[in-house]
Amino acid sequence: MPNRPVDTADEARQQISRFGYAQELFRSMGGFSNFAISFSIISILTGAGTLYGYGLEMGGPLEMTLGWPIASIAMLAVAASMAELCSAYPTSGAMYHWTAALAPTSFGPFLPWFVAMFNIIGLIAAQAGINYSCAQFIAPFFNVAPTQKNLFLIFAFVTLNQAILNHFGVRLVAILNDLSVAVHIIGVFVIVGAVLWFAPLQPVSFLVSPINSNGRSPYWWAFLLGLLQAHWTYTGFDGSAHMAEETQEARTHAPWGIFMSVAVSGVVGYILILALTIAIGNIGDVLKSTVPPPIAIVQSAVGLRAGSALGALASMAMWFCGLSATASASRTVYALARDQGTPRSSWLRRVHPKLGTPGPAIWTVAVCSIAAMAWAEAIPIVTSLSTVTLYISYGIPILLGLLARRSTGADWTAASVWRLGGAGKWINLGAVLYTAFICIVLIMPPNELAAKGTLGLIAGLLLLWFVRARSRYTGPKWSAAAHTAAHDSR
């Protein structure tokens, strides 16, 4: 549970200097805007909509009824664990810096660098999946044939205009993300109201039907594979941590942003999923539709034109989701470059003196996102890859924090304003065990390309480390004295 906030204006100005950095980014984001970043990246209309058909095919209505709350409860444990770490180390590096602070010295600078790279790759892959999903929802609204070429062109256009807006300032992105919260909440309840009012509804017993539409056996395994639908939604809530250096009273507001984004998404997302599921006329028809399954369900309930209009509302939410994901990923790239941990680090760490945004990092994220989608060519693959890489980057610092709680040295939680107290070690343990379990599930067939991609990434990162990064990167800039001071001042 959180302690009473103790940040003052002077504390906020001096906070980042205690970790050895200058305040280059504008610290102008309030608590709600910080929450809005993570809430927008989770984007229930994106995650619940994009892979709704995948989850429905794997586990049927029971997948929707049980899968979402299982994932939500587990992710609340992960979010709470990350929130406490963020309160102790409120920097743009987030998981990367948490790892550097808590890892045994025997790991040297490799483990923090590895976590940073996995986090960056996961965020870029997630943005690719988000924006390609947005393209899929936009195409029917503008009566564009959903060919692979057309969808890719729309996806690239969406990605580039998000980069432009991010380039022009954190204040603009904060305003748009505040609006995003309203779009998501209103969008969910408009869609829910429309389908419940106009669609012929299934009996409540339909919600617990264990229907597998692709013949995968046994059913429980298909159900576990279908959890990808919920878990891809629950990625990106580390965005609040990455924006900490731009958030006022970051040690309080950023942790709350992480935790509340998952909690609110869990409740509102469940309402949406149950409403869509109980309004399904025929599962086979929904899965065979030429439009995404949620649009097919809504169109069946309210008609083609009204359904397309509601689909456009969902695509707007997806656009906001990609906008926030760009901001989060670019801050991670910037933080690692600031510590000389990337190629061309002197260029990637540049911040525009007037706009206060890391322009080179933003455009690098956009270009890499387009390249990632060109390589993957399939939403389930890129979403599986992003989910696994992000969850690994979440799980490692949580595990290190758990182990550090048992050490005889200084308690790192003393630096936190947002604390879990005596329940912390159990919440951490549950988060670590579940994260490891779900990462294994999500790389199983039919997502074996995600497994190959993850192994390929590990091999590539090891090669990059030994060939180049090891001789250039020595870890975060903070010195032992600065790190001690950051603790002692609390």
Image: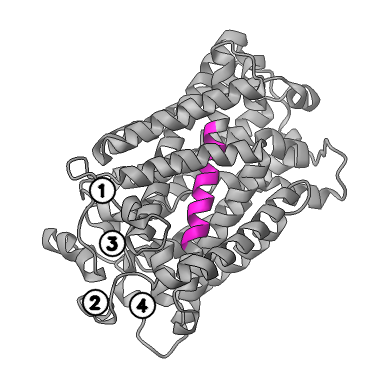
Query: Residue at position x 70%, y 33% from top?
Result: 53
Label 3: few (<14), some (14–19) or many (≥20) C-alpha neighbours in 10 Å? many
Give the x, y percent position of residue 367. 47, 39
As drawn, the label of residue 251 is 3
Q: To which residue does mark 2 refer?
A: 482
Nearer the observer: mark 3 or 1; the answer is 1
Q: CA distance from mark 4 to mark 1?
A: 31 Å
- Contact between marks 2 and 4 (CB within 8 A): the answer is no
Label 4: few (<14), some (14–19) or many (≥20) C-alpha neighbours in 10 Å? some
Give the x, y percent position of residue 304. 62, 10
Label whose residue precedes the other's in the sequence (3 or 2) = 3
The single residue placed furthest to the left in the displayed view is 10
Label whose residue precedes the other's in the sequence (3 or 1) = 3
Q: Is residue 126 magenta?
A: yes
Q: To which residue does mark 4 refer?
A: 412
Give SS at disc 3. Answer: helix
Q: Is residue 178 magenta?
A: no
77 over 348 or under it: above or below? below
- Contact between marks 3 and 1 (CB within 8 A): the answer is no
Give SS at disc 1. Answer: loop
Query: Residue at position x 45%, y 25% from top?
Result: 316
Nearer the observer: mark 4 or 1; the answer is 1
- Contact between marks 3 and 4 (CB within 8 A): the answer is no
Label whose residue precedes the other's in the sequence (1 or 2) = 1
Give the x, y percent position of residue 388. 61, 55
Q: To which residue does mark 1 refer?
A: 351
- Residue span colored magenta: 116-131
Left or right for 227, reference 391: right
Nearer the observer: mark 1 or 2; the answer is 1
Q: CA distance from mark 2 to mark 4?
A: 15 Å
**Magenta region, main secondary structure:** helix
Quarter assignment of residue 16: bottom left
